[in-house]
Image: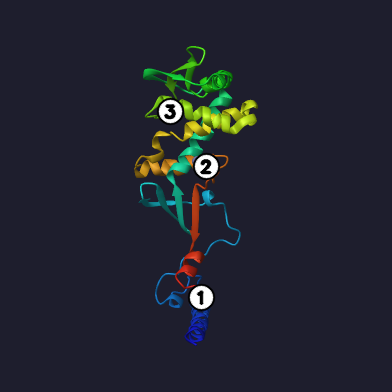
Amino acid sequence: MGGSRAVTRGASRRRAANRCRSTSGDRQPCRCARGGAPSPPQPPAGPQPLLSVPLRLVGVIGRLYVVLESDRGLVLLDQHAAHERILFEQMLAQLEQGNAPSQRLLLAETVEVSARDAAFVRELLPTLTRLGVGLSEFGERTFLLEGLPPYVRVGDARQFVLELVDQLKAAGQEVNALRLGEQVVAKTVCRHAVKANDPLGPRELDQLVEDLRRCAMPYTCPHGRPTLIELNYRELEKKFGRAQ
Ligand SMILES: [Zn+2]
């Protein structure tokens, strides 16, 4: 019964709002419908893609989720996923053009793998080199890691190479197709992106959003997780029990 009274009240408030609008003469939204609170902007009829509307930075929570505001409501961006997507596309673009930049490690490291894995790694050496991973043959089953892309930071270079081999093996036959091999390598390299877990300043965060806008597939990371979540005003109103 309380519910029905609320509905009636809502209906009369709507009528009041309509009256205000018709007498005011201009297109200013009436404020009395929400007890004086400004009425949130309504989403456009045909929603534009999230990254083609202006986004304003609000802050970062949990050192990972970037809080943004659009005219449609709240937007959350996963900093790690977004950065992975940007790096992934940059790496693939660099591959198209030639070699990716590589930075020499202070200390080269040797990595030993099984005989079967060694054959596998040997086949992929040209791809790894072009991606900026400076790995070369050092023995029958031993490889020397001398360089990494500048934006990659690995605590344990050996572990990094072994992980790369595991990922490539997991991709199985697909790796035989050169392009897919490149994609697996790029995805693994992205996981070690320097900025992925670092605190970023407002300018870097704005740049992150700008770089994401330029991506071909900006809404997911290379592993398929979403980079952005939108909670529009209509959904917020529903959650706060304001929706009629
Ligand atoms: Zn990912």
Amino acid beneath label 1? Gly
Q: CA distance from mark 2 to mark 1?
A: 49 Å
For the residue pair 30 and 192, the one nearer the viewer reads as 192
> Which image quarter: residue 180?
top right
In the rendered image, the vertical position of residue 179 relative to residue 14, given as above or below: above
What residue appears at the point 56 percent right and 25 percent down from the top-left corner?
95
Label annotation for residue 159: 3
Q: Position of residue 110 (x, y in %)?
A: 42, 17
Amino acid beneath label 2? Cys
What residue appears at the point 51 percent right and 43 percent down from the top-left corner?
213
Q: Is residue 198 left or right of residue 114?
A: left
Respond yes or no on whether mark 2 lies under 8 Å from ligand 1. yes
Label annotation for residue 39: none
Label annotation for residue 221: 2
Q: Residue furthest top?
A: 139
Callout 2 environment at 10 Å: few (<14), some (14 to 19), or many (20+)?
Answer: many
Respond yes or no on whether mark 3 lies under 8 Å from ligand 1. no
Mark 1 highlights which residue? 25
Circle 3 or circle 1, nearest the eye: 3
Residue 201 visible in rendering: yes
Respond yes or no on whether mark 1 lies under 8 Å from ligand 1. no
Q: Position of residue 238 (x, y in %)?
A: 49, 69
Circle 2 or circle 1, nearest the eye: 2
Q: Position of residue 121 (x, y in %)?
A: 55, 21
What residue appears at the point 55 percent right and 22 percent down from the top-left corner?
117
What residue appears at the point 49 percent right and 83 percent down from the top-left corner?
3
Question: Which badge, 3 or 1, comes first in the chain's sequence?
Answer: 1
In the rendered image, the vertical position of residue 228 relative to residue 147, given as above or below: below
